[in-house]
Image: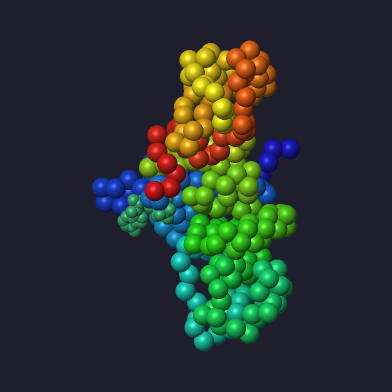
Amino acid sequence: MPMEKVIQVENLVRRYGSLVAVNGVSFEVDRGEVFGILGPNGAGKTTILETIEGLQRPTSGRTLVLGMETYKEPLKVKARIGVQLQASAYFDYLTLTEILELFGRLYPQRIPARHLLEQTGLAEKANATVSKLSGGQKQRFTIAAALVNDPEVVFLDEPTTGLDPQARRQLWEFIQQIHREGRTVILTTHFMEEAELLCQRVAILDKGKIVALDTPAHLVRNLPAPYEIKLLAEGPLPAHELEALDGVVATYKGEDGFHFLKCTDTSQTLPALLRWAESRSVRFQQLQVVPATLEDVFLTLTGNQLRD
Ligand code: ATP
């Protein structure tokens, strides 16, 4: 049976005056997927998300959610999605429970506030106001608020930006839990490790265009050099000899004395390297295989770093 397409984006273009923020983007998201849009600041991630959610109008092209065109049926779409925005403001004098109950009243179908707070690890803060929450707790609360109408599709715009590593990890676990519940999740991020961990598929966005779309593993595997071998040795390591080893694409030397071999296949290069080392009586102090990441994919495709 073909997968149900929960989100369809067709030739989406969004201009702000002379600036083309989204320049002909198309993709589809299947039911139950966690789909990531990965790109640097200003790539157009938020604009795409907000157009799918119905918060912005496309200049041309269209977006569909659960088969309904967002721009034509915004209310029907909004009833079935949950949206976490990059910046959220809540009522200063209401408790977390009161805010969730208030939001819940806007929808025919809702999840009880108590359940949402337990799920997000905020049960102890049920009677606190938002101003009393830490950064990580606030981020979790914004996602709890996005789940109030028991949505089938959840949109998360840079959910972990500004969080410390521990709070980020907690939020990752929470997003995985939302996924296990069978919801479709579409998120934006400029943290490649977040995309690698959470997303079944990732669209890499640069300057308003998708430059690659696939599973994180395929994107990395299709690189010209998906692995690096990192070496520290006592004697000299002549670059021209290392470059001649099986499967080596390029070599370079790091500032800290390490040598790096970029290679296509470590199962070819490692034995060749060890044979070469033995024949030259070279002793390695350190030898490490480092797989490439989505950061390398982005760098290879655009020539730029993902983060400033
Ligand atoms: P970030 O990671 O910083 O959130 P992003 O990838 O989400 O970035 P967008 O917020 O979609 O990027 O912005 C894409 C481009 O459109 C940027 O150059 C931005 O300055 C511009 N832009 C966004 N909203 C508007 C607006 N309302 N008016 C004019 N330009 C805008």
- Residue 150 screen position, x and y as percent: 66, 65
Number of labels in the image equals 0
Its colouring scheme is rainbow
Give the image quarter of residue 271.
top right
Give the residue displayed 38% in from the left and 42% down from the top.
Answer: 207
In the image, residue 98 sits, relative to residue 25, either above or below, namely below
Horizontally, is 199 left or right of 188 in the view? right
Left/right of residue 166 with respect to residue 44 in the rendered view = right
Using the rendered image of the protein, determine whether residue 151 is visible from the camera's viewpoint: no
- Up-down relation of residue 108 to residue 221 (above or below): below
- Seen at 60% across and 41% down, the residue is 201
Query: Where's ligand 1: which quadrant?
Result: bottom left
The residue drawn where x is 65% and y is 16% is: 278
The answer, for residue 302, to whether it is visible in the render is yes
* Residue shown at the point (41%, 35%) measured from the top left: 302
Given residues 149 and 75, the one toward you in this image is 149
Can you say which quadrant of the picture contains the N terminus?
A: top right
Q: Quadrant of residue 99?
A: bottom right
What percent of the width, then of the height, locates residue 158? 51, 57
Farthest left residue in view: 18
Image check: 285 left or right of 24?
right
77, 47: nearer the viewer: 47
> Residue 223: percent from the left, percent from the top?
54, 28
Question: Residue 118: image x %, image y %?
Answer: 71, 72
Of residues 68 and 237, the one drawn nearer to the viewer in this rendering: 237
